Image (cartoon, rainbow, N blue to C red):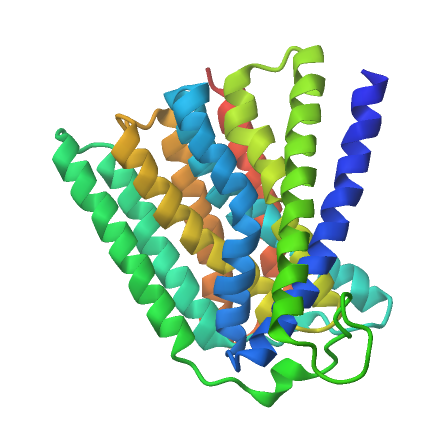
Amino acid sequence: MFLDVVLLIVSLAVILVGCDLFTNSVEWAGKKLNLAEGAVGSVLAAVGTCLPETLIAILAIFIGGTDIGIGAILGAPLMLATLAFFVTGLAVLVYTRKGLRTIDMNVNHKVLGRDLRYFFIVFSLSAVASFLPDYWMKAAVAATLVTLYALYIKQTFAEDRGPEVDEDISPLHFFKREGDPPLWVIILQALAGLGVLVFGAHLFVDELRSVGNAMAVPISVLALIITPIATELPEKFNSILWVRRKKDTLALGNISGAMVFQSCIPTAIGMLFTDWKLDRNALAAVVIAVISAGVVWGDMTSRKRISAYSLLVGGFFYGLYLVWVFGFK
């Protein structure tokens, strides 16, 4: 048990190193390819850091069973819409107290608003599909989700890049010389960062399972709650790094873009390769995730800004979900 806890802590350090490598390379890739900050945060960073948990969720469908697979798929957007927002808001508060930034976040409302609107639609469709009686109806919904994600990518990449995106980009870790690094070095560092992330995420999940088994935690709870927390840590660390550097659109876009991806692609795969019948806990995950994200969207649209406090509400909704899971049998 003691060794498992030590390895759990080590895995967190490994994930943090991988995130630093990846975020640094993503910023340089965006500059090199002249991409807007929405494309960098909501697509490149979000999809890249989604890979570890997406692979785990897909493997769970074919190896771990339908319940574990569905739990892993739906658990990811839940963690992003609650805990990821909460941790990011907490980071803003901490850095504000240290005098490194302000409590209000300078976010591109068009980018975040688009992400959240897509999320509301596609994640709600995932719940509706559970009540469809025929496999081909669910397959049609899966195809719709993939189509919507393709449209989302097209709209995101169509934006113009602002000059503020390039401010204060740290030198590429794999290229310390002056001047722009070649694209192949940027890609090499991104792949290295992803490799470290995958290794750290797998180590974290394995050790978390060992700790959970030692504490007699049911496997269904691991699938719906603990495993998604572990596999979503890369997004949280990436966003914290960007928040510290006042790159708020990248920080929140990293989370909201991952929410769109996770509620489209893995969910579509789940509909195609499982019976996709959601139980009460799974449906509750969808409802709470949508409501939690709705608070952030409401703050942004009503006050034309986002404060850390609206992000902190995600912690309340995550606690509410825990009460639902453990308080009602």
Q: Residue at x 14, y 38 (%)?
A: 137
**Number of marks:** 0
Quick check: 14 left or right of 78?
right
- Position of residue 277 relative to residue 182, above or below, is above
List x then y, in percent, for residue 94. 80, 60
Left or right? Give the position of 291 relative to 171. Answer: left
Q: Is residue 216 left or right of residue 97?
A: left
Quadrant that contains the N terminus = top right
**Residue 111 or residue 267, whichever sits in front:** 267
User: Residue 290: image x %, image y %?
Assistant: 41, 49
Residue at 82% of width from left, 72% of height from top? 100
Please determine whether, in this image, residue 60 is positioned above or below residue 172. Answer: above
Residue 295 visible in the shown view: no
x, y percent for residue 15: 72, 45
Q: Which residue corresponds to the image point at 87% horizontal and 67% vertical from the top-left?
A: 98
Residue at position x 69%, y 18% from top? 210
Q: Is residue 22 visible?
A: yes
Tell me where residue 289 appears, x and y as whole percent.
Answer: 45, 45
The vertical placement of 59 against 19, above or below, is: above
* Outermost bottom residue: 163
**Residue nearest the viewer, comparing 61 with 83:** 61
- Front residue (pair 26, 185): 185
